[in-house]
Image: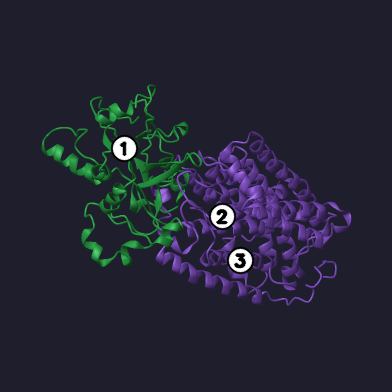
Chain colours: A purple, B green
Amino acid sequence: MDHVATLPGLESRPRSNAWLAGGFVIVLAWALYMYRAQFVSGLGVTGLNKPVFWGVYIANFIFCVGLSAGGIAVSALVHLLDKTEMKPVAIMAEVMATSFLVLAALFILMDLGQPTRALYVLLNANFSSPLLWDVTVISSYLVLCVALLYFSARGELIRRRGADANWRWLVRILTLGHMSLSPAAVKWDRRLLRTLAIISIPGAVALHSVTAWILGLVKGQPGWNTPILAPLFISSALVSGLAGVILAVIVGRQLFRLEVAEEVIQSLGRYLLFLIPVLMYLLFSEFLTVGYSGTPVDLEVFGDILGGRFSRIFWFDVIVGAVLPLVLLGLPWTRNLTGIALASLAVVVGVFAERTYLLLPSLMRPAPFMPGGVYYTPSLVEWSLMAGAYSFGILLFLALMGLIFGNGAGGAARAPSYRLAR
Amino acid sequence: MSADKTQPLWGMVIDLDRCTGCQACVVACKQENNVPFSSREEAAYGREISWIRVMAVTEGEFPKVKIRYMPLLCQQCDAPPCTRVCPTRATYKNPQGIVGQIYPRCIGCRYCANACPYQVKYFNWYNWSHFRWPAEMRESLNPDVSLRPKGVIEKCTFCHHRLQHAREQAAIEGRPVESTDFVPACVSSCPARAMVFGDLRDPESTVHKLAASPRAFRMLEDLGTEPKVVYLKEGEWNATTGG
C-alpha cells in the first residue's frame, strides 16, 4: 500500500468507517425529527415567506442536480475515451452522481407543501410546466445513472466480492445471477457502457438545462429570465461535478484504499483548471450585459449581488470559488494532491454560493406589489434538513462505495492494479 | 380571449378616482372566502393571506407628495403565467376566463406564486383548518367556500361560488347567465362604487364601456398577460383626459 499517497494527518485513520457512518446517522435522525415538525405544522416553520417562496431547499436541489450531471459527464468521458486506468474514477463518479440525484429528489420533496401528493405531477401532468419536465428528466436520468453504475461496477463487484462467501448471495441478487467475467461478457459490458455514455451526455445537458429553465422561463422575473442561465448552469454543473469527482476519488483512496494513480488525479485537476474560466466568462458576460444596458429592475437584482445583501456570497464565490482554485491548480508547486483537494473543495463550495446568489436575489428584490422590506433567513428546520439530507447522501455514497470496493485491504488485495502503463 | 365566445368573460373595472382606500373590500373578501387570520408578526414577515389588498402607492417627492390607493387582487389574466407553470394543472383558467385553484390537487411547490408578476397568489404556511381557527369565529364561516389545508396555494376566484349560485338560478329560469347576475364580495361591499363587475364581452355591460375609457389601463400590460382587471387612472381634470 505504500505507493498509495495519503493526505497528511490521515495516515493513522482506523480502517473501519463505522464511526463516520454513525455520526451521519445521528444527524439524519435529528433531521427526521425536525421534518416531523414541518410535516405536521406546515412550511411556516421555515424562514420562507411571500415573496421569497423558494429558499435553501431549492438552492440545494439545483446544486445537487448540478453535481450529478457533472459527475455523469466525467464518467461518460471515461467510458467514451476507454481509459482503463480511470475506470475506478468512472465508478466513483457514477456513485456520486446517483447519490446526489437521489438527494436532489429529496430536496424537492422536502420543499413541497403537500409532499404526499408528489405523484400528482404524473397523474395530472401539465406539459407546459418546466417542473413536469424536470421530474421527467430527473427520473429518466436516475435510471440512466443506475444503469451506468451497474454495468461499470458489475465486474468490480464480482471480482472483489464474488469469491467472498459472506457477500456472494448479495452479489448474485444484485447482478441477477449474471456473474460471468468471461472476455465476451466483459466486452458486452463495455459496449453497453459506450452506448449509455453516448446517451448520457445529451442526458446530462437536458437534466441541468431543464433545471435552469424552471427559473429561466419565468417571465418578468429579472435575474432568472435570461437565456444565458442554462449554459451558465451547465458549466457550473461541469465545474462542480468534476471537483466533486476529484474529492470522491481522494476520499475513496483514503477510505477504501483504492489504487488510483496520482497522475489520474493530476489530469482531472488539469481539466478543472480549464473549466473554471469558462464559468467565469459566462458570469462576466451576464453581468456585463445587465450592467451596461442598465435596466432598472435588472440593476436592482444585480446591485444586490455585486454590492448589496448578497455581495459577501458573491465575492466569496469569486475569490474562493474561482481565483483560489485557479491559483492552486495553476502553480506547479501547489498542484499536488493536497492542493488539488483544496481547490476542488473550494470549487464545490463556490458553486454552492453561486446557486444561492443566482436563485435568491430575484425573489428578494423590492417587489413592486409588496410594500415594506423583504427578508429571508433560513430557519433551524431548514439547516437541519439540509444537514440531514447531506448526511443521507454521504451515507448512500459510502454504502455504495463500500458495497462495490469493500472496506480496506481485504478487497484491494484481490483487485487488479490500475496503472497508467497498460 | 377565451375560446368559447358564447360564454360570458368576467372582468372588473376599478376606478382609482373613486377608491378611498377604506379597505371594505379587503374585509368583505376575507369574510366571504374564509381567509385565515394572521398575527401582526406573521403579516410583517410576509405570511399574511389577503386575496385583495389595498396598496398605498407614494408618488412624487416632498412637498409634492401624493398617495394613491390601489386595490390589488388576482388580475384574472387571459394568458396567465401561473397556470402555465403549474405541474399538476391545479391552477387553471375556466371557459369564462376565471383563474381557479383546485386545492386538493395542489402539491404546494409554489411555482405559480413565483411566476405571478402581480404577487397575488398566497401560500398556506400554517395548519389553519385544524387548530388555529378561533372557536367563536367558526359560526361565521361561509359554507360555500372550502377551508384550505396547509401547504397549498390559494387565490382570488372572483367569488366563483357566487357564480355557481347565479348559474343555478339562471338554469332554473331557463336563460343564460347574464352580466348582472352576480358580483364578487369586494364589489358589493365597496361604499364608493369604485369597483364594477360584469361581462367584458357584452357590449351593453358597464364594465365593457368603462374598459374602453381613455383612463383605462391594465397592470404590467407589456408582459402580455392580458389581465381582466382594468384600472381607471385618477383623472387630472384636464381637456385631454376628459376627466
Q: Position of residue A363 (x, y in %)?
A: 53, 49
Q: Position of residue A357 (x, y in %)?
A: 61, 51
**Residue that protrudes farthest toward the top in the picture:** B239
Measured Cα–Cα span from mark 2 to mark 1 = 48 Å
Residue A171 shows which numbered tag? 3
Q: Position of residue A203 (x, y in %)?
A: 60, 44
Measured Cα–Cα span from mark 1 to mark 3 = 78 Å
Residue type at mark 2? Phe
Q: Residues within 10 Å of mark 3 (few under 14, many from 20)?
A: many
Q: Are marks 3 and 2 in contact (CB under 8 Å)?
A: no
Name which residue lies at 72% across and 55% down. Answer: A347
Residue type at mark 1? Arg
Residue type at mark 3? Val
- Depicted B176 relative to depicted A8: above or below: above
- Depicted A275 relative to depicted A398: above or below: above
- Label 1, on which residue? B18
**Residue that protrudes farthest toward the front in the picture:** B63
Chain letter behind tag 2: A
- Asked whether A307 or A346 is in front, the reply is A307
At numbered mark 3, what does the secondary structure look like: helix, strand or loop?
Answer: helix
- Asked whether A196 or B111 is in front, the reply is B111
